Image (cartoon, rainbow, N blue to C red):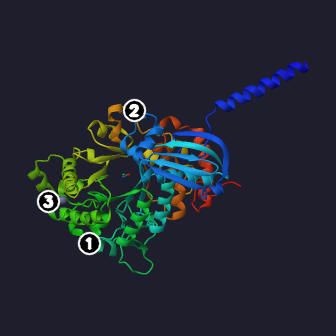
Amino acid sequence: MFRMKKIFLVLALVLGWISTQAQTPQTNLIPAPAVYSLRSGSVSGSKLACLHEKVRISEKALLRRFKGRKLADWQLKSAYWLEVGKKGVKIVAADEEGVFYARQTLKMMASLDSSVSCCTILDWPRLRYRGMMLDVSRHFQGKDFVMKQLEMMALLKMNRFHFHLVDNPGWRLQIDAYPSLTKLTAWRPQAFFWDWEKNEIGGPFVEEGTPGVYGGYFTKQDIAEILAFADERHIEVIPEIEMPGHNYETRAAYPELACSLPSGGKDPWELCPGKESTFEFLEKVLLEVFDMFPSRYIHIGGDEARKNNWKLCPDCQARMKSEGLERVEELQSYMIRRMERFAHEHGKRIIGWDEILQGGLAPDATVMSWHGTEAGLQAVREGHDVIFTPTHYYYLDYHQDPAQFRPVGRLVSLEKVYSFEPMVEGISEADAHHVLGVQGNLWTEHVQDAWHAEMMLYPRVFAIAETGWSQAEKKEWPDFERRASFLSDVARKWGYTVYPPFPQE
Ligand code: ACM
Ligand code: ZN
């Protein structure tokens, strides 16, 4: 009997040993790296930053480590090989960008683990656009808040910040040619958006400097500082200037930009695409925006234009007649195409929300697919680039837990965010390069302050970062959930509010 027990014990130990050997080594990193192998020994997390660092920037040397694996140029630029040893750290990359991402990996390792296992990592991004959008119009957040989020994005290897700067409740960008945009329509009497907006129409604006006024905007100097900060972190900032809808504030500052309506017309959102002066306004604004932002892209909005005014406005009707347009959707396309030509003349490409498909897509436009993924699929099939930001997965104003503060929209839990697969069904291998990437959108109608904004972002942005960077086969929900909880604790220590904002003791 005793002999049998001994045999079972030995067998259990051997099986246990075999199963530990077969397991892939575990890392706590987000996003999960492509190839991670353990070496013997460990380094204390606090000492990692002080170890000797040897950096080599050489495409050839990096490619040797890839052993024939094919990468696109943009992937190679971000790729890195990293070796953490007891005595030092070695980095090989083809470009400064890869060195930057290797260092972000080191920074995260040192923050997550008191004892970092010696290891080798070979890593590269899955998608080239790994984005986050912040709406600073409904409720304003300033430069410090923006930079703090850029810092977290960089740690997560995210590389596109979509800056939703203007919308009905506030214009947030200095434009010298049109000073009323910030002297007047960046300020309102009520701080909370829903106290200001009545019946989906919008409330009053008041002059800058009025006592008790709520609002704010970014000066050109603020933008320059944000851009320098983002650039050091390999993040491209893409500004959005909305047209033709969501322009209540623009029209409050410059009423001549609205349609000239016979009595009875009262839809207040659109610019008038019938008038030449509207294009003059947009072009002058965009010239200043192009001067401020070096991004190749300008986001021109294009969403939710109601277009009812255009059926009544003599200028819009005249434009439709002279351009041979039958539907108001085509009038929107006329406007977007014309603005695309202007953007091209200045070396820029446009991005628009998926409504820009409705009256025919501008030739070179990139589509942000937000009504689910169908529009994105259509755009890809028409040969256009697409960024997926579907409401049911990536709208970060939607609640992540029914018990949270001010829950709105559908339930978009961390697991739901993590489950999104950007190569949606129907996209062929040949078209896959048109899927630029993914983006989480934080709309702020219900999100009034930094505390609330951050808890809507985190930890869900961690999941978007992993979907954008990590190879598809590396994604695994239970393991991500474990890692997200470690990173949440670290982020809290650094002063971020992470959901739940009051973790259980
Ligand atoms: C949007 O949510 N209106 C793009
Ligand atoms: Zn009009």
Q: Quadrant of the N terminus?
A: top right
- Sequence-earlier tag: 1 or 3: 1
Left or right, residue 202 beside residue 466? left
Q: Are marks 1 and 3 in contact (CB under 8 Å)?
A: no
Q: Quadrant of the C terminus?
A: bottom right
Crowdedness near tag 1: few (<14), some (14–19) or many (≥20) residues, C-alpha within 10 Å: some
According to the picture, the residue beneath numbered tag 1 turns out to be 178
Left or right, residue 337 beside residue 300? left
- Which disc is residue 425 wearing? 2
Q: Is mark 3 within 8 Å of ligand 2?
A: yes
Nearer the observer: mark 2 or 3; the answer is 2
Crowdedness near tag 3: few (<14), some (14–19) or many (≥20) residues, C-alpha within 10 Å: some
* 29 or 411: nearer the viewer: 29
* Residue type (three-letter) at the residue carrying disc 1: Tyr
Q: In this orientation, does residue 46 appear?
A: yes
Helix, strand or loop at mark 1: loop
* 42 or 219: nearer the viewer: 42
- Which disc is residue 315 wearing? 3
Q: Are marks 2 and 1 in contact (CB under 8 Å)?
A: no
